[in-house]
């Protein structure tokens, strides 16, 4: 397999490139969201393709939890060479017909090079947008419509929240 | 005919449950009285269904031949998905995919 660092470099450049166009005369918060959306949709398309290619040899993923476990183990290992640290569920079947999962990574490879602690916490969302899209895309190929958001308390630990939308 | 076979596929998927944790399903179904065709089905993890209709006049194809055909189909479909110019859900217009399918069909006949 190819060296993981190549993807890290490419990803860093992607974020930098999309952010460079942000230096417009009127960079309101709306602009920022646009760029994050571009990154997220790129991740979505990549996730769709990965969702087709990765589970090829694995057995059928019957339950939703199986799919999430597959994400934490196989997808993370394939893209970042390590497994996700923890997966928690937070179902509120009575309040809303949606399932919520929290995926936690205590040492996210795309953030680990930046800092360790509270520095750069405001910049972190840009670097997580692509990965959010990746998760959403893979889930969508495997038949689960969802909404993925990420949050960072202190680098390089981050958590991804997956809210499954059941119609 | 293909539509009815899709219904049978759906039936099988929902009936499988947790007993068989096997991704593939290979079955011999829908042998019509007038036209003798055999229909094989295959389901991927991404809920994509492949249906193959075979004329049963030639000596029945062996099980593992069908399986290998489905595996090749799955691999080509994965390649089509990875093509950045392809939008999932569109009709497949890849020449590589078409040529693979044609060569497979020629091989069988």
Image (cartoon, rainbow, N blue to C red):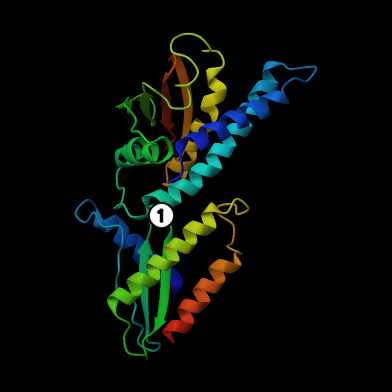
Please identify the quadrant where the C terminus of chain A is shown: top left
Would residue A71 be found to the left or right of residue A141 on screen? left
Q: Which residue is most to the left?
A: B19
Helix, strand or loop for disc 1 = loop
Vertical comparison of A110 with B10: above or below: above
Q: In the rendered image of this protein, does residue A110 appear above or below residue A124? A: below
Q: Position of residue A116 (x, y in %)?
A: 43, 13
Residue in the foreground of this view, choosing between B47 and A23 = A23
Q: Is any atom of residue B28 visible in this view?
A: no
Marks counted in the figure total: 1
Please determine whether, in this image, residue B39 is positioned above or below residue A84: below
Left or right side of A145 for B28: left
Left or right of residue A105: residue B77: right
Q: Residues within 10 Å of mark 1 (few under 14, many from 20)?
A: some
**Mark 1 — residue?**
B47
A7 relative to B35, above or below: above
Residue drawn at (24%, 54%), measured in percent from left and top?
B21
Locate residue A134 relative to residue A18 in the image: left or right.
Answer: left
Q: Quadrant of residue B43?
A: bottom left
Please provide percent x and percent y for residue A131.
Answer: 49, 32
Q: Which residue is the extreme one toward the top?
A: A118
Q: Residue at x 46, y 44 (%)?
A: A2
Q: Residue at x 42, y 83 (%)?
A: B108
Residue A32 seen in the figure: yes
Q: Nearer the viewer, residue B89 or B36?
A: B89
Of residue A143 and residue A46, the one placed in the foreground of this image is A46
Percent across and percent down for residue A141 are 46, 47
> Residue at position x 34%, y 74% from top?
B66
**Tag 1 subunit:** B
């Amino acid at each position: 397999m190819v060296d993981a660092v190549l993807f890290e470099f490419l990803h860093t450049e992607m974020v930098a490139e999309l952010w460079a166009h942000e230096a417009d005369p009127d960079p309101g918060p709306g602009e920022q969201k646009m760029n994050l959306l571009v990154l997220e949709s790129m991740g979505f398309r990549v996730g769709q393709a990965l969702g087709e290619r990765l589970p090829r040899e694995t057995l059928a993923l019957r339950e939703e939890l199986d799919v999430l476990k597959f994400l934490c183990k196989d997808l993370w290992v394939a893209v970042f060479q390590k497994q996700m640290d923890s997966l928690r569920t937070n179902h509120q079947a009575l309040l809303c017909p949606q399932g919520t999962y929290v995926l936690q990574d205590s040492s996210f490879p795309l953030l680990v090079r930046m800092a360790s602690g509270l520095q750069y916490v405001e910049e972190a969302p840009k670097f997580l947008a692509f990965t959010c899209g990746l998760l959403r895309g893979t889930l969508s190929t495997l038949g689960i419509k969802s909404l993925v958001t990420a949050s960072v308390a202190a680098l390089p630990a981050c958590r991804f929240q997956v809210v499954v939308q059941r119609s | 005919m293909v539509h009815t076979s899709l219904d049978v596929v759906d039936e099988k998927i929902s009936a499988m449950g947790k007993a068989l944790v096997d991704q593939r399903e290979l079955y011999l179904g829908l042998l019509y009285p007038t036209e003798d065709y055999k229909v094989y089905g295959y389901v991927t993890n991404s809920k994509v269904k492949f249906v193959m209709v075979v004329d049963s006049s030639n000596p029945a194809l062996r099980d593992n031949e069908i399986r290998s055909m489905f595996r090749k189909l799955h691999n080509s479909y994965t390649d089509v998905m990875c093509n950045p110019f392809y939008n999932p859900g569109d009709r497949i217009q890849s020449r590589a995919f078409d040529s693979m399918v044609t060569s497979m069909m020629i091989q069988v006949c």
